[in-house]
Amino acid sequence: MCEVASMSDRKAPEQYGLVETRLQERLDNGTTQCNLCLWRCKIKHGQRGFCQAHVNRHGTLYNLSYGILSSIDINAIEEKPVRCYRPGTKVMSIGSFGCSFRCGGCHNLDISWGVDALDDLARGESRQAYVTPQEMVDVALKAGVQGIAFTYSEPAVWLEYVIDVAKLAHENGLYTVYVSNSFVTDEALQQVAGHIDVMCSDIKSMRDAFYQQICAVSSVEPVLHAIRKAQELGIHVETRTNIIPGRNDSPEELRQIAEWIRDNLGADSPWHITRFFPAYQLHHLPPTPLDIMRKAEQQALEAGLQHVYVYADTGCDCAQENMPIEHYLEADAETLFAPKKCAKSCCGDDGVLLKKYETDATENIDLVLNSPTKH
Ligand code: SF4
């Protein structure tokens, strides 16, 4: 597997450019496999992975979105939601573009899937903000927060930047939070261990059928394994379930989730129960009735969980009401949103976009979305 030694010594780029991804493996069939998340995409030259954030150029995988910021805000840590780590402190929440899921009820499509933004980056036509890790930590320190939270999009597809920021955050006395779908590999978790203090992970359901129908991935067990693994690696783990009417709201299933947390993470492990609000392909469903949420809490308490939190007002950690990025960065918008062209020394004369991406990679995504159990 080509990776890590060179990555750990690498200096963070001062300006936007493609950054080699951490976990990649050249295969005999001419593809390169990305081992950051459980898709383990096998990507040909010119194609991008399922998340659209990683591109193969001549056999090497690069992250398109290193340092590219989609959203930023300051929140109480309780809003992530995290309740049993440094309560009463504030975090700077940041995210980029790209996700390993395609959730039918997503509230954050333009950020989490980030299709337009990632296409622009792939074409070398992006006007999104680029922020170096040091600048990001400086902004957080100046804002007077105690931690940095990687959220809004899936941090695993932004891992190179997450780790660079997290290392500097720790050096400057800030803690780090990682809000995730936990569709990540053991290798990726080992990379973040020691750099991430808190992981807030979704347990969306205990049924494979839910993950297949709502998230376009085949089963729940790898997600549960990753949550367990994160805790074994010493990361403080809290879990969250967004209850969707008619999809994951049966008392039996909610009891099963609570029992799984009790048996695998401990009776003192916090569980957050959040309310679904209609969006995207699930726009026709009603918000979760409050009595179902109370029943879920009851199930959890009966199962023996000691820290159960119910949220009636928010359905997700979305970026919809954030202040503009330039407000937090105190930057002049013209400079901040200047076109991001990759240096020629990085990609050569043919630029970032290779024609093949527009055909094969797009077809692959259609294939996956139409056949959720196959990849
Ligand atoms: S979806 Fe993205 S992060 Fe996951 S394996 Fe594929 S290229 Fe890597």
Image (cartoon, helix red, strand yellow):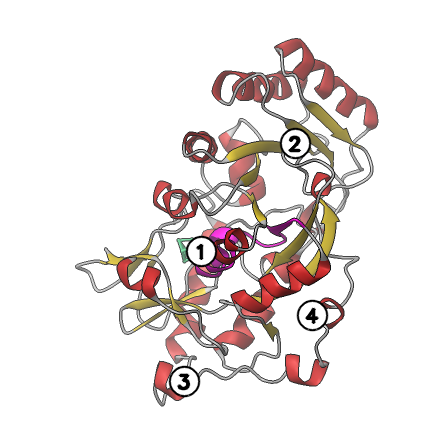
Tell whether label 1 touches label 3 (CB within 8 Å).
no
Quadrant placement of the N terminus: bottom left
Apparent side of residue 357 relative to residue 155 in the rendered image (left or right): left
Residue holding disc 3:
351
Residue holding disc 4:
329
Label 4: how many Cα within 10 Å (few below 14, some 14–19, many 20+) = many
Q: CA distance from mark 4 to mark 3?
A: 29 Å
Upstream in the sequence, badge 2 or badge 1?
2
Q: Compared with residue 337, is residue 34 higher up or lower down, i.e. above or below?
A: above
Residue holding disc 1:
367
**Kind of residue at badge 2:** Arg
Disc 2 is placed on an element classified as loop
Q: Which residues are magenta?
A: 146-166
* 99 vs 211, nearest the viewer: 99
* 27 vs 130, nearest the viewer: 130
* Residue 198: percent from left, percent from top: 55, 39
Q: Compared with residue 132, is residue 179 higher up or lower down, i.e. above or below?
A: above
Label 2: how many Cα within 10 Å (few below 14, some 14–19, many 20+) = some
**Kind of residue at badge 4:** Leu
* 126 vs 280, nearest the viewer: 126
Q: Tell me which residue sits at (73%, 14%) in the image.
A: 298
Q: How many marks?
A: 4
Upstream in the sequence, badge 2 or badge 3?
2
Residue 366 visible within the image = no
Upstream in the sequence, badge 3 or badge 1?
3
Residue holding disc 2:
247
Q: CA distance from mark 1 to mark 4?
A: 40 Å
Q: Tell me which residue sits at (53%, 37%) in the image.
A: 211
Disc 3 is placed on an element classified as loop
